Image (cartoon, rainbow, N blue to C red):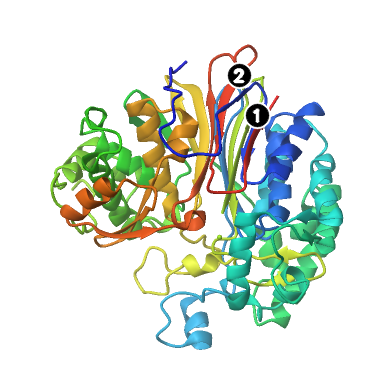
Amino acid sequence: MKRFDYGNPYPSTRIPVFARNVVSTSHPLAAQAGLRMLHQGGNAVDAAIATAAVMTLVEPVSNGLGSDAFCILWDGQQLHGLNSSGCAPAGWTPEYFRRKHGADARTPPMRGMDSVTVPGAVGAWAALSERFGKLPFADLMVPAIEVAERGYLIPPVVQQKWAAATPILHDQPGFAQSFMPWGRAPEVGELFRFPAAARALRAIGQTRGEAFYRGEIAEALARFSAANGGSLTTADLANWKPEWVKPVSKDYHGYTLHEIPPNGQGIAALIALGILSNFDIASMAIDSAQAQHLQIEAMKLAFADVYRYVSEPSSMTVTPEQMLDDAYLASRAKLIDMHRAQDFQAGNPVKGGTIYLTAADESGMMVSFIQSNYMGFGSGCVEPEFGISLQNRGHGFSLADGSPNQVAPGKRPFHTIIPGFLTQDGQPVMSFGVMGGNMQPQGHMQTLVRMIDHHQNPQAACDAPRWRFNAGLNINVESAMSPAVVDGLRGMGHEIDVINDSYQDFGAGQFIWRMGDPKTEGYVIASDPRRDGLAAGW
């Protein structure tokens, strides 16, 4: 059991929570839905699914029934990975988009039906329940159905982003009908109901997800797509299925970090930590400009390779193993100048709006689960009969010839959402994640360095001010970061924007750290104060 420093030098509204059966996510009603399943005799997988279903309702800016999902879980004996990201419709080719959106288009559009790939979240729920769940699948949908029918009061952080999205998306098909019930976004504390989603959740529960991919919901989605210029068909939905995968991993200072392999960006966190392994970062003051500079530069090097090489595995020109090779990462580490910020290019590793939740139970099962509609409210398109808010992951494809991420029928796009899992000597230590676009691997690295190298407890590591690399020499930093650190980074050449918007710019984390035998000692859990969340347990 790791001995943390339980002091917290950062302003926070949260404290670490200790319990044997735990759920942590970014809305209290969702966390309580997970605990409800545990009280009913379910396990951590049951809790995670119920939590995820409620999250589609209470944080619709970030996810919905038309989202994608990924999961890493410890079943009590071994680690499993699930890639439940959707693929391109059969009609999608570069020519399709150039014909519809102009010969100079570089990517599929950001919004609308031509940004929608097959949704994978519901498939993830069904696959996890079938393989690892204990309770009847229909029971897992009950809390979400209740929330959809009775409604809930809108919390502050969600309302802020909801209001920001409505001017952009109000003309997208189905959006205003579903998410502007008064002709505007809800206000904080107003009651929001979503009866259409309740209909969908009932059908999903009764058919173990089959209605979504091969039944009445699939037919409604195909009709909606055709009526609004899309190409998603019942065949696209019926032919898709989630994929069980082996997580990719990298050792770091006595621990092993595990991530979902490409087409996701989790490998960026592994690359960055592999580079940091070549430095004695523990000897640096935790919140010093020197320590932050080193992490920023390692992250830049990681993204340079990820953006160049990562796509669906069948299209990659290098392997994850080559990208994570110790000698290669040591050579990349040598490029870092400890006194100057740089704009790195990709190397040559060839030799010759997301929600996150985590749950664990006293049997030792631990679940790291993430689902997302990509940008706020995704495509903006909402099928009205069943309230299916569709993601816009298709925007992650490229139309460029020669790109490993070029769009093709049935192909998965580059993905940003990444659940994380930490082990030590083959045994589970922590299920965790940090939401928010390309902030996710950056958040993984920053919080792990704090916990592993500097012994900060999970809540303190979560509360600490963060930075976010954008491109070139530009980074954002939270307004809570010390002015002396900001000045020190600027002196090294970093171009810094200080931002006071934590929702997306700096992510939001949830952490469950195993303290020992879960039957006797349990876990310590943390929830990010940047969201409306809750770490709950019993």
Depth check: give the residue in front, 13 or 286: 13
**Residue at horizontal 25 percent and vertical 39 percent from the top:** 288
Q: Is residue 423 above or below residue 355?
A: above
Query: Separation of disc 1 and disc 2 at Cα?
Result: 9 Å
The residue wearing badge 1 is: 22
Q: Residues within 10 Å of mark 1 (few under 14, many from 20)?
A: many
Q: Which mark is residue 522?
A: 2
Which image quadrant for residue 524? top right
Depth check: give the residue in front, 55 or 107: 55
Depth check: give the residue in front, 283 or 73: 283
Q: Residues within 10 Å of mark 2 (few under 14, many from 20)?
A: many
Name the quarter where the C terminus is drawn: top right
Q: Identity of the amino acid at label 2?
A: Gly
**Residue at horizontal 37 percent and vertical 43 percent from the top:** 269
Q: Is residue 162 above or below residue 147?
A: below
**Residue at horizontal 69 percent and vertical 69 percent from the top:** 185
Residue 412 in sight from this viewpoint: yes
Q: Identity of the amino acid at label 1?
A: Val
Q: Are marks 1 and 2 in contact (CB under 8 Å)?
A: yes
Provide the secondary structure element on which disc 2 rests.
loop
Residue 315, image x, y percentages: 41, 59
Closer to the N terminus: mark 1 or mark 2? 1
Which image quadrant for residue 40? top right
Residue 441, image x, y percentages: 41, 47
Residue 226, image x, y percentages: 71, 79
Residue 65, image x, y percentages: 70, 58
**Residue at horizontal 50 percent and vertical 39 percent from the top:** 12
